[in-house]
Amino acid sequence: MATSRVVGLDIGTTFIRAAELEFGRGPRTTRQTPTLVRYGQVPLPLGAVRGGEVAESAIVSAALRDLWARTKFSTRDVVIGVGNQRVLVRELELPWMPAAQIRGSLAFQVQELLPMSVDEALLDYFPTGESQGPAGRMITGMLVAAQRDTVTANVLAVEGAGLRPTMVDLNAFALLRAMARGPLAEQVVAFVDIGARVSNVVVAAHGVPRFIRTLPSGGQDATDAVASAMQISAMDAERVKRETGVGLQVAPERQAAADAVATPTRALVEAIRNTFVYYQGNHPGAGIEVVVLTGGGCHLAGLGQYLASASRLPVTLGDPLAGVKLNKSLDRSQLAGAESLAAMPVGLAYGVAA
């Protein structure tokens, strides 16, 4: 079998990021060490993507064409992600049956559990374990139910750019594939990807997802607060936010900006902390050992220390490139110091090997 390449495509609120991975000969598996051949990103204007869903398809399609022209990806086959408040993820135990039969029967087994009609949903099931109980052999896993139109909007924007979506993956699973490697695959880890408007929290025990939550907030909320408080543009507000940070000493003339950053950031940190508390309350004896941050929003100065103090857990910055080889021709300057931004597109590309 020849080597094969796939592009993981992350359509965020303020940026589109894509990573092309090359897998070696033979069957593709998540245990392989692929090569990152190309990586690129382009900005998006605010409003083109809202709450993790494409709102302005023509704008996103144009940005994608620009990204492909700039980065020269070798394939138009892409794996895209989905993850927002319109995607339900919950743990579900079912009578054991082959995976194909589970997926084929999901609509009948879960229709009473969904806040939407099964006709309006795209359903999937991610097995995580098996057990033997009074009712016989059982399988435990994660039910994923996405509103059909939120997925369709993203697919249409991608197809409008002349690309071929080969798979739609849950962003939370992509994050796990990219990050749960090496020592992190042997611990109970909370992976937290902070985007502009959406943040994903995945708690995994020894590489297996145990709890997933999508939070409707991110780094752009603090940018908006600074822009409003100081009556400046979004671009200037982003710069001021990053220069100011959170929980740090600032000059008197920066106090208004510091206060503006602190309010939404405190709310986000509290939501993340409450997620940890909820998980640990429902999984006694399997407490979180470390928190790993990724995404554009995690680079706010002081955020890691702030979350560590609030959660009383060690917090570190994630590096999804630690698990891949880097092609010699790759422009590494665009990734220096920003490796954590690649977590989602790299994890989406891994989806073809899942």
Image (tube, grey):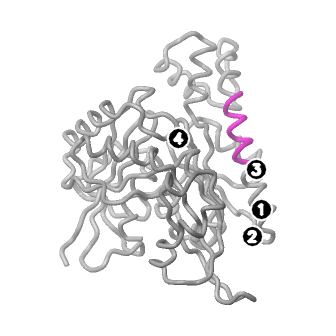
Residue found at x 71% / y 32% = 247
Calculate the distance from the C-alpha at mark 2 to the C-alpha at mark 3.
Answer: 16 Å
Kind of element beneath mark 3: helix
Which numbered disc flags the more N-terminal residue, 4 or 3?
A: 4
Q: Which residues are magenta?
A: 263-273
Q: Which mark is residue 286?
A: 2
Q: Is residue 87 left or right of residue 315?
A: left
Across and down, in percent, residue 51 comes to 52, 37
- Circle 2: residue type: Ala
Across and down, in percent, residue 299 comes to 54, 39
Total labels drawn? 4
Which of the two marks, 4 or 3, is nearer to us in this view? 4
- Circle 1: residue type: Gln
Calculate the distance from the C-alpha at mark 1 to the C-alpha at mark 4.
Answer: 24 Å
Kind of element beneath mark 2: loop
Observer-nearest residue: 298 or 243? 298
- Asked if 18 appears above or below 350 in the picture, the reply is above
**Which residue carries the number 1 mark?**
280
**Which residue carries the number 4 mark?**
195
Which numbered disc flags the more N-terminal residue, 2 or 4?
A: 4
**Which residue carries the number 3 mark?**
311
Which numbered disc flags the more N-terminal residue, 2 or 1?
A: 1
**What secondary structure is the magenta-colored segment mainly?**
helix
